[in-house]
Structure formats: C-alpha cells, structure tokens
Image (cartoon, grey):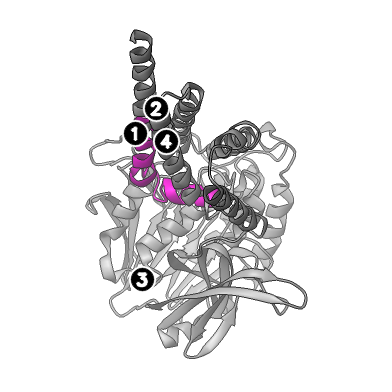
Amino acid sequence: MKQWINRKGVMIASAVITWLLCLTTAVGLFAVRDSQIGLWRDLSALMGGFAPIAAVVILALDAGLSIYFLVRGLRGERVNRQLLLCMLVGVLLVFLLILYLVLDPVGQLWIFELVTKLAVGAGAILIALFVLPRTISHWKMAPRIIACVVLACMAVLAVFRIQINSIWFDPTVYAVEDEYQIVWYTSARSNGWVEIDGQKYYDAQSGNIRSTEKVHKVTVPMAVLDEAKAYSIHSQGTLIHHGYFSLKGRHLSASYSFRPVDPSDGIQLHNISDTHDYPTGAIASASYWGDRLDFLILNGDIATAAETDREMLEVLDIASAITGGERPVVYARGNHETRGQSAATAYKYVGCSDEGNFYYEIRLGPVWILLMDCAEDKEDGHREYGGMADYAAYRAAEDAWLDEVLANPEESYAAPGVQYRLLVSHIPFNVTEKPEPERYASWVQKVNGIGLDLALAGHTHQCLFLGPNGQYGEEEKMAASTYWTVIGSAQKDIATDESDSAHRHFTSTAVELQTDAVTAMFVNQDAAVCDKVEIAR
C-alpha cells in the first residue's frame, strides 16, 4: 500500500510539474516581447508560418497526454515512463524559451533556430519510433483514424508549405531616386500588387509576377502617388504554382492614405540609426513631429546583423510603427546590415537602386538628398567577413557614380526647385578614416562644393553637432568638411545619461528645414528636446 501511495505521488507530481512547465511556456509565447516583433512572429519568421500554432499544439498535447497518462496510472497501469517523457518535453519547451530570451538581446537567434529545429526533429523521430506505436495500440479504431488523419494533414502542410497568410506591419514607402518602392511582408508565400486610382503595379520580374516570396516590393512613380495621396496593397497566397496550373488562397488587402512632403510650413524630418534590434525607445523618440513629419530617415544598423531574413524585418517594423505607411522613408545601409548570410538579400526589405546599390539621389519636393553607402568599416580581408566581402570594388564604383552626379549639377543638386541639400550616410566619412582614408577624404572634398545644408549620420553611437571644419576626437582629419554634420543616435537618454538592459532609452535626431535656418535637435524617448543647434542659411 505504501509503495502504491509513493508511486501515486510521483505520478501526480510529474503531471503537475508538466502542467506548470507548459503554462510557463504558454505565457512566454503570448507575453514575451523582448523585441518589437515578439516571440510569436519570431517563430513564424524563423521556422514558418505554422510554427507558433505547432508550438501551441505541442503544449496542448503535452499537457493533455500528462492528464491522460495520470488517469491511466491512477487506475493501476504503469505509466511512469510516459509521464517522465511528458515532463521532459515540458523542460525542453522552457529551455527553448530561456534560450530565446538569452540569444535575442545579442542578435544570435540563428542558434535558437538551429537548436529548436534539431530538438523538434529528434523529438518527432523518437515519438514516431517509440511512443506513438505503444500509445495508440490501446486505442479504439476511431481515435486511431483521427490520429492518422492529423498526421497526414500535417505531412501535407509540410510538403506543400501551406501556411496561414496575413499581412505583417503596415507597408513602408521607400523613396528611391524619382520613385517609391512600397514594401510589405506576408506570413505565407504570396503574390503582391499595389493599386493607385485603379492602376495595378505588380511585384514582378521581367513580366513574371512573383509567387514564392513573403516580402513584397512594388515600384510606383513618385509623381503618381504624390498626386493620388492614397494607395492599397494586395496579396494572395499561392498554394500551388505549376507550369499549367495554379491554386491561390484568399485575397488580403489594406488601404492607406499618403502624405507627400509638404513644404508649406518648412520640412520636418526624423533621423534614426543604430537601434540594433531594440526599436522601442527609437519609435517613441520619433513621435516628436507627430502628424507634421514629412519623412523618416533610417540611417543604418537597424539590425545587428543579417543572419536571417528575420533581422531585416526590424527595419519594416520600425518604419511601419513610425510612418504607418503614410510617409516616405529614406533608408541608408549600415555596416552591421552587410554581415550575415542574408545580407545579400537585404535589398528585398529596403529601398535600393535598380542595380541593387545602396547609393543614389533622392528628390522629395524641394529636398535633394545624396545617399552614400560606406558599407563595412573594416578592410575586406578582415577575419570577421570570412573572405566574403568585396566592398573596395563597390566603393570604387560608387566613387565613379559620385563623379557623374557632380558633373551634372543641373540634373541633381542644382535642379529647378531644389531648396535644401542633405547628405545621408550611416558612416560619417568626414570623421571616419577606416577602411579607405584616401577615398573618404576625396569624397569630403567632392561634396564640399555642393552647398550642403546638413549631413546626417550615425555609426558612432553618439550625439554630436560638428560645425564646418570641426574636429572629431583629437586628431586632425585629412580633409576638412565645409558643412555641418549631425551624428545623432544613442541607446541612452543623453539628457540624463540613463540606459537600461531593455533598451527603452534612446536619443535620435529631429530636423527642421526652413528658408532662413536649419534646426537640428536631439530628442529622447519622451519626445523631449535634449539639445539643439540652429544653423543659419
């Protein structure tokens, strides 16, 4: 009798521990938002659209099976091994949750992805070989059929990659040269198009509408959207796409108003860089202008790396949270966004030229923007890049392009209607010498003659106003700039010098362009001005 009571207590304890572990994981799935995207969407981005649902199913099965085996055990059957297995599954789920919480802050979710896939694969094999046959051997015919149908459905979903489709985030309207590139993301493979005044613009390549992408980029003429001031995005899931047959899912759509740059009260813009996967404080600081915001600049290092496509979703997340798809966005690539296996496909998520370059001119109303890309901040042969960097050649091509731009001022910075001239680059090459000091010095000399109103940069994780010929640090640079430079993003509140592990404190840059002056302000997460400078024009 005593042995029975002890065995009963062990079974009850095992079941209770399993329930607590499952409850902890369930709370984590719905409550943990260590990044702006959150655990639920991270699972979808890393392992497919059904991953969160699969996690919930595993939780429910684990908790349910623990009850089932407990009942059988209380009836006198020996189910200690089964209950122990349920408890081990609960421990594994909590371990994966903790692993996520540890790796997400340091931008190493690829390790979480790898460990999770290995654990799920190993678990599936063990269940198929040892657990399932013994478990269903006691079942009646109906439960066996149901189990087989469920497994068959899961196999079909996996083989045909069928996923629940939804639109993540509001779209981002990137300004590139004389066009807008509208980008949005769906949870499943879809085609995509934009409608403006009844005209459809497709996410297509050489006439073929893409049907295998989750990220959609549609190019529309800037003048068309500026005049219409409204657009809608559309996606339709692609279940099957063969040479002579295709099957589509449901049609998703969303409509947006759009506000082009309005110079009637001056130009108001906001510059953010170096969020490094922690957007909360940055988004809060960008609320400074409210509805007066004319355009947003995301000035690089929004992601800590491009290890997977999930990191580039941070860019869309921040842009959509600030602009709601209703304001233009200018994107400058940061050096950290050149790192990782998905860096070569990062162009899908952000604005870039037709050639795939991250340097080009932009015209937004009376504002002319020279967008420069320094790419990495180390030599191509540095061990960090593993022999997969060729940025010296990239910068050489950019140098030739810059010469062409400056050779035709009437078509660029001196074109009719241009009132303001901005230089945007993640790395401030007038204060940074590596990796090519001679080239950077020549760039400074070349842009000195443009008559820039302001240069906006990041990279150094500081907030600094640098006047013409101003020194950065103690050393005199090879080429002195004739323009003001604002280096303006820091993961702290510079007014109080406060920061925290959750990265809720942030300082970014708000800029106002007026006919007689340019005002640059450092703004904290409370949308309060910490410091400012007024530059007479």
Which of the two discs, 2 and 3, sits closer to the camera? 2
Q: Is residue 105 above or below residue 416?
A: above
Image quadrant containing the N terminus: top left
Name of the residue lying farthest toward the right: 243
Is residue 324 shown left or right of residue 380?
A: left
Asked whether residue 25 is drawn in magenta, I would say yes
x and y, in percent, of residue 439 in the image: 65, 49
User: In terms of secondary structure, where does tag 3 sit?
Assistant: loop
Q: Which mark is residue 294?
A: 3
Which of the two discs, 3 and 1, sits closer to the camera? 1
What's drawn in magenta, residue-wise? 20-46
Residue in the image at 52% along x and 67% along y: 183
User: Which of 73/191 is in front?
Assistant: 73
Separation (CA) of disc 4 from disc 1 = 42 Å
What residue does disc 1 label?
501
Asked whether residue 532 is drawn in magenta, I would say no
Task: Give the residue type that dot 2 points to.
Answer: Arg
Separation (CA) of disc 4 from disc 3 = 60 Å
Is residue 76 shown left or right of residue 135?
A: left
x and y, in percent, of residue 506 in the image: 32, 45
Residue in the image at 39% along x and 29% along y: 70
Task: Give the residue type that dot 1 points to.
Answer: Ser
Task: Give the residue type that dot 3 points to.
Answer: Asp
Separation (CA) of disc 3 from disc 1 = 32 Å
Q: Is residue 130 above or below residue 310?
A: above
Task: Give the residue type that dot 4 points to.
Answer: Tyr
What residue does disc 2 label?
75
The mark nearer the N terminus, 4 or 3, is 4
What residue does disc 4 label?
68
Q: Main secondary structure of the magenta part?
A: helix
